[in-house]
Image (cartoon, rainbow, N blue to C red):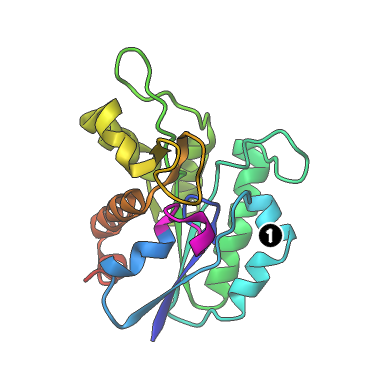
Amino acid sequence: MNKIIWAGDSTVAFNQADTYPQTGIGQEFDRYCKREYLVLDYARNGRSSKSFYQEGLLTEALKVMERGDFLFIQFGHNDEKPDEERRTEAHTTFQEYLMIYVNAARERGAHPVLITPLSRRLFQADGTIRNSHGEYPGAVIALGRRENVPVVDLTEKSRVLYERTGEEESRKWFMYFPAGTYENYQEDMKDNTHLHYEGAVRMGALVAEGLRELGGIYAEILA
């Protein structure tokens, strides 16, 4: 059985019951895959391409990786942060760390896929989404072109979806709800980064759309 292995941050990570309904894209992605693919989610909250690697999380993921598997690599949210443990620079160290993941997959006969970071749901007065990721999505795309690595541009796909849906209606995809809606959350939640269960399913559909556009072995994953 071939595997789809996720390396990334909280937007794609697997959540336990204590944080429900927060859900990562990787947690629900198996609904888009053929039954002969096993989805394994190694993503962790708060990690950047740098800290995920330096903490040995990539090493753990590589232990289960075999020829023909897929490594989905999605970072950027925390690479932007100012702290030394996570910070990378978009067109230098960020790309260098991403290439560690790409090369590790290729060395094992697996297929790396770069995924740009999910857009934050930050509406401006004119109804458009503010770019909170700076140069990081573009750096992923540029690296993919230069190194011949397939890229799913989730940043752009999610931005278009939010703008088409509108500010109020798109809240349902995020951890955005009144206090007491869920037992775990006794204060108002207005989190425009982390996904509600429904959001993880919807954003997973965007990743699946990107794989279908890539075609070939990437489209063959999909049910």
Viewer-closest of 124 and 20: 20
Q: Residue furthest bottom?
A: 1
Residue 117 on image: x %, y %: 47, 44
* Quadrant occupied by the N terminus: bottom left
Residue picked out by circle 1: 53
Residue 169 on image: x %, y %: 25, 33
Residue 217 found in image quarter: bottom left
Q: Name the secondary structure under disc 1.
A: helix
In this rendering, position of residue 145 left or right of residue 31: right
Q: Predominant secondary structure in magenta? A: loop
Is 139 one of the magenta-colored residues?
no
Q: Amino acid at mark 1?
A: Tyr
| Within-10-Å neighbours for mark 1: few <14, some 14–19, many 20+ | some
Residue 180 found in image quarter: top left
In this rendering, position of residue 174 left or right of residue 217: right
Give the extent of the magenta segment.
Answer: 13-25
Is 17 one of the magenta-colored residues?
yes
> Can residue 62 be seen at all in this image of the molecule?
yes
Viewer-closest of 97 and 83: 83
Residue 44 on image: x %, y %: 59, 58
* Quadrant occupied by the C terminus: bottom left
